[in-house]
């Protein structure tokens, strides 16, 4: 017997999965560069969110056309991949359609896969048309140039090729077609191969089979570099998403302690510091780089699908401001990748003279945000761009005193008069007697 | 106008049913003061025993927090909480969604636990409990559109209370294309109210006002003093100020009752 095929298959499989696992470990390491935040409470609400939003895609269908097409592609993707189980067994042990002993159930399965594959092909083509012919504006914002634009297209082409290969593989499988069951789509492709003799057909079938499985492994490894990580990360991302009302911003605990000290007359600010306290590095307020963000924010960055629903709803972006919440997420991911590469190279992070603030995200973007939460509401995978914007504003204001002049004025007023304008607190009830 | 302060009430040994948190805009801004007064008239009409803090009230710290100044926010919060807890306040109503959100969501962790209502919620309850009734048909059949304040709607999922009040006026509520959870911001939030907008091609309030105008309503209703300012400016910018009025829900109710 000839084992070369099986050995080649095992090697390809091993490499494909191995590389993926390695990259995924890097990804987890990068996410863990973020600060700790407790998102383990209320697990039942979290599971529910995950089931509804990631699995059930409840937020996708808010835009019904894109939503339904996406569900088809997603279901197709998951269900057709059940077929991969058979492919792997066949590949490793040299069997052919090992699961066909399931009889009519097998035919039913393959038949459904074929129909799904066809629907996926149609949906993906419509996606392509929406992007490239109808040019839906949110796919053409300025952050969608170069790789982000191509990334989206590569994936569409990938899907088209994989689905076609699956159907060709079935169409050229002579015994399978002779059985004439479970081939609702591929039977229509058979005429294309008319006139091929048995051995050519066999070669076409084998080639399609090999390309199909190699394609899947390449796709798996492409994920790490792509916005398509969301097919995996949407699940943890929706699980760990914020459960509080959207208007509730975190209260910084480090600030609470200091404010309590300031307001407490019994504490002597000049008292000797307790042993060791002087050596402690005071905590940095807000975020100027990715390590200052928490790990959920970093997970958010990797999960972003670059769909631009957030940006399309953002009042600042709609009115031509520099801010785009999608760009906030993409820049955070780019910087995180850069930091990760730095660690890969040096063993630990070595200062590269860059940071998320200024080198990636400009203050002008941050100051354009109205904190309206439209981006958070729109995001189909519960990403929170606003949380990053706020943390970076905190750094600008509390570490650098770099707020816009008018805001400094407002804050001085709050501090001195208890109101954002220059009115005296003692006049607060004057309205009562005014006409 | 009958507006007792907490200090006066306490001196008489009384505790009000609810504290009315007026807010900075409601206390100082000329346009917002009208909303404050309209709401007080409603409270008085319904016989609600309320009080205000008066000169003991101070900014909740919302604009400072959204600008990124957590220090200033927490200083304000803790000072206010001390006053509120000193008076043993349990229940607060406010006509400002920003105060509402901050008091409701951000004070508890700092030691301030209160039941907080937006004025549209309280008015709805007063109507449902029969303490208040709407008889005047001033707005009957008129088209009114409602602009959702971000800090009431998306931030706290309150969409129905203001709408139910518009329906009680027997007016015709016409929704804008972007409404409820998809509502477009007026442009004031996140401390934008206190600064010039960043460089762009259009002002947010104009974009939003144009959308409101498309509903052909002569009244743009809202439930936030800052949205009110923004939309009023937007109406002016589109030269429609003779045509279209921007009114708070409390003003609509007070007007229809001729209060
Ligand atoms: S919260 Fe900020 S970034 Fe998000 S949609 Fe509103 S203005 Fe845009
Ligand atoms: S943050 Fe969410 S809505 Fe915005 S582009 Fe990413 S996935 Fe889409």
Image (cartoon, rainbow, N blue to C red):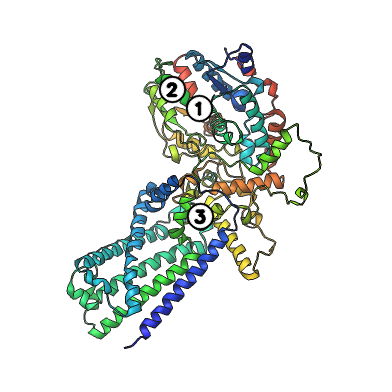
Q: Residue A296: in sight, yes or no? A: yes
Name the residue that disc number 2 marks. B125
Q: Quadrant of residue B67?
A: top right
User: Is label 2 in a helix, a strand or a loop?
Assistant: helix
Identify the subunit bearing mark 1.
B
Considering the numbered disc 1 on the image, is that residue within a helix, a strand or a loop?
A: strand
Residue at image location 42% in from the left, 77% down from the top: A12
Give residue B166's quadrant in the image. top left
Mark 1–mark 2 Cα distance, whole angstroms, equals: 10 Å
Does label 1 or label 2 sit earlier along the sequence? 1
Structural distance between the alpha carbons of marks 2 and 3:
46 Å
Q: Chain of mark 3?
A: A
Where residue A316 appears, x then y in whole percent?
Answer: 55, 45
From the top left corner, tell me how far across and down residue A99 is, in percent: 26, 71
Identify the residue at the far front of this view: A275
Decide: few, some or many residues near mark 2? Use Cα within 10 Å; few <14, some 14-19, many ≥20: some
**Same chain for the residues at labels 1 and 3, yes or no?**
no
x%, y% of residue A243? Answer: 49, 43
Q: Which of these two is toward me, B82 or A349?
A: B82
How packed is label 1: few (under 14 Cα within 10 Å), some, or many (20 or more)? Answer: many
Quadrant for ligand 1? top right
* Residue labelled with disc 1: B117
Q: Chain of mark 2?
A: B
* Left or right: B9, with A46 as reference point: right
Q: Position of residue A112 (x, y in %)?
A: 25, 63
The answer to whether mark 1 is within 8 Å of ligand 1 is no
Question: Which residue corresponds to mark 3?
Answer: A141
Q: Are marks 1 and 2 in contact (CB under 8 Å)?
A: yes
Look at the numbered disc 3 and give the secondary structure of its residue. Answer: loop
């Amino acid at each position: 017997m000839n084992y070369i095929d099986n050995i080649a298959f095992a090697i390809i499989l091993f490499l494909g999965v191995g590389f993926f696992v390695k990259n995924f470990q890097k990804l987890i390491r990068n996410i863990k560069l973020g600060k700790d935040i407790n998102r383990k409470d209320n697990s039942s609400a979290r599971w529910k969110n995950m089931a509804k939003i990631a699995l059930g895609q409840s937020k996708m269908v808010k835009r019904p056309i894109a939503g339904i097409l996406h569900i088809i592609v997603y279901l197709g993707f998951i269900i057709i991949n059940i077929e991969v189980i058979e492919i792997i067994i066949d590949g490793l042990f040299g069997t052919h359609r090992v699961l066909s002993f399931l009889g009519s159930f097998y035919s039913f399965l393959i038949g459904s896969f074929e129909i799904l594959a066809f629907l996926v092909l149609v949906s993906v083509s419509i996606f392509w048309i929406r992007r490239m012919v109808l040019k839906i504006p949110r796919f053409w914002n300025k952050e969608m140039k170069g790789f982000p634009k191509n990334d989206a297209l590569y994936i569409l082409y990938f899907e088209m090729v994989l689905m076609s290969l699956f159907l060709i593989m079935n169409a050229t499988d002579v015994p399978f077609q002779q059985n004439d069951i479970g081939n609702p789509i591929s039977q229509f492709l058979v005429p294309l191969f008319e006139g091929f003799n048995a051995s050519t057909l066999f070669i076409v079938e084998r080639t399609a089979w090999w390309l199909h499985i190699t394609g899947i492994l390449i796709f798996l490894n492409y994920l790490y570099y792509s916005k398509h990580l969301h097919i995996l990360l949407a699940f943890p991302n929706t699980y760990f998403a914020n459960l509080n009302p959207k208007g509730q911003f975190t209260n910084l605990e480090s600030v609470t302690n200091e404010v309590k000290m300031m307001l407490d007359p019994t504490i002597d600010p000049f008292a000797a510091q307790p042993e060791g306290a002087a050596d402690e590095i005071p905590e940095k307020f807000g975020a100027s780089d990715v390590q200052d963000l928490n790990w959920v924010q970093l997970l958010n960055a990797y999960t972003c699908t670059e769909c631009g629903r957030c940006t399309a709803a953002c009042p600042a972006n709609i009115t031509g401001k520099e801010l785009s919440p999608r760009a906030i997420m993409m820049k955070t991911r780019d910087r995180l990748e850069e930091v990760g590469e730095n660690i890969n190279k040096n063993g630990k992070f070595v200062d590269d003279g860059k940071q998320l603030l200024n080198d990636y995200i400009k203050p002008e973007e941050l100051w354009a945000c109205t904190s309206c939460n439209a981006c958070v509401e729109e995001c189909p995978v519960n990403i929170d761009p606003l949380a990053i914007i706020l943390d970076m504003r905190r750094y600008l204001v509390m570490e650098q005193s770099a707020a816009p002049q008018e805001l400094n004025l407002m804050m001085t007023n709050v501090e001195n008069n208890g109101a954002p304008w220059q009115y005296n607190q003692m006049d607060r009830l004057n309205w009562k007697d005014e006409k | 106008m009958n507006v007792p302060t907490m200090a006066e009430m306490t001196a008489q040994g009384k505790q009000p049913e609810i504290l009315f948190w007026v807010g900075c805009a409601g206390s100082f801004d000329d346009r917002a003061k009208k909303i404050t007064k309209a709401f007080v008239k409603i409270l008085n009409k319904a016989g609600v025993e309320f009080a205000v803090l008066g000169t003991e009230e101070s900014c909740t710290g919302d604009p400072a927090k959204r600008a990124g100044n957590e220090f200033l926010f927490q200083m304000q919060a803790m000072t206010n909480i001390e006053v509120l807890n000193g008076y043993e306040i349990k229940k607060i109503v406010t006509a400002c969604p920003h105060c509402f959100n901050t008091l409701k969501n951000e004070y508890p962790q700092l030691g301030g636990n209160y039941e907080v209502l937006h004025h549209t919620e309280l008015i709805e309850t007063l109507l449902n409990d029969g303490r208040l009734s709407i008889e005047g048909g001033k707005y009957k059949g008129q088209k009114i559109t409602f602009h959702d304040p971000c800090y009431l709607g998306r931030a706290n999922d309150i969409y129905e209370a203001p709408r139910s009040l518009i329906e009680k006026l027997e007016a015709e509520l016409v929704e804008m294309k972007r409404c409820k959870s998809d509502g477009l911001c007026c442009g004031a939030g996140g401390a934008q109210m206190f600064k010039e907008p960043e460089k762009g091609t259009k002002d947010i309030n104009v974009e939003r006002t144009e959308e409101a105008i498309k509903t052909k309503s002569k009244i743009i209703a809202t439930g936030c003093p800052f949205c009110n300012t923004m939309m009023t400016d937007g109406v002016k910018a589109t030269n429609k100020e003779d045509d279209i009025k921007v009114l708070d829900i409390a003003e609509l109710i007070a007007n229809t009752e001729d209060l």
